[in-house]
Image (tube, rainbow, N blue to C red):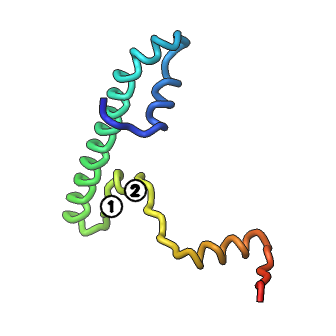
């Protein structure tokens, strides 16, 4: 079975009726596979609709959405921070006072 996120596994398990523990384990690969198929189908449909909208907009001289649905729903990468920036944020949020030892 491919590696999937914990949210997909949890949602897949919650979508089935009450079962015993071993039944959940035996059904899980099929549930995850179906969830992945549905997600891929949704992306295919949204990409198709985006292309149809783009072609129509170009023909009619209008505007269209340039980003793909898949890129909109992906998590945004977190900004890299230095240690000093993190310390400054913690001090600011918690109201700590920095006391020097000199």
Q: Is residue 100 above or below residue 40?
A: below
Residue positioned most to the front = 102
Q: Residue at x 73, y 75 (%)?
A: 92
Which is more N-terminal, label 2 or label 1?
1
Q: Is residue 8 above or below residue 59?
A: above
Callout 1: 10 Å neighbours few (<14), some, many (20+)?
A: few
Residue that badge 2 annotates:
72
Q: Is residue 94 above or below residue 50?
A: below
Q: Quadrant of the C terminus?
A: bottom right
Is label 1 in contact with label 2 (beta carbons under 8 Å)? yes
Callout 2: 10 Å neighbours few (<14), some, many (20+)?
A: few
Q: Residue at x 27, y 55 (%)?
A: 53
Asked which quadrant contains residue 9, the reply is top left
Residue that badge 1 annotates:
67
Question: Toward the viewer: 5 or 58?
Answer: 5
Residue 24 locus on image (x, y percent): 46, 16
Q: Residue at x 31, y 44 (%)?
A: 43
Q: Is residue 3 above or below residue 46?
A: above
Residue 74 locus on image (x, y percent): 40, 53
Q: Residue at x 25, y 69 (%)?
A: 61
Residue 3 in the figure: left or right of residue 92: left
Q: CA distance from mark 1 to mark 2?
A: 7 Å
Residue 19 in the figure: left or right of residue 47: right
Residue 56 locus on image (x, y percent): 23, 58
Could you tell me which secondary element the residue under label 2 belongs to? helix
């Amino acid at each position: 079975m491919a590696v999937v996120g914990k949210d997909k596994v949890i949602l897949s398990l919650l979508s089935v009726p009450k079962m015993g523990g071993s039944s959940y384990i035996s059904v899980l690969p099929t549930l995850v596979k179906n969830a992945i198929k549905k997600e891929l189908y949704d992306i295919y449909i949204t990409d198709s609709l985006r292309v149809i909208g783009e072609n129509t907009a170009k023909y009619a001289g209008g505007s269209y959405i340039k980003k793909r649905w898949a890129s909109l729903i992906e998590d945004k990468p977190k900004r890299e921070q230095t240690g000093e920036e993190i310390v400054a944020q913690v001090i600011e949020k918690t109201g700590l006072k920095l006391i020097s030892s000199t």
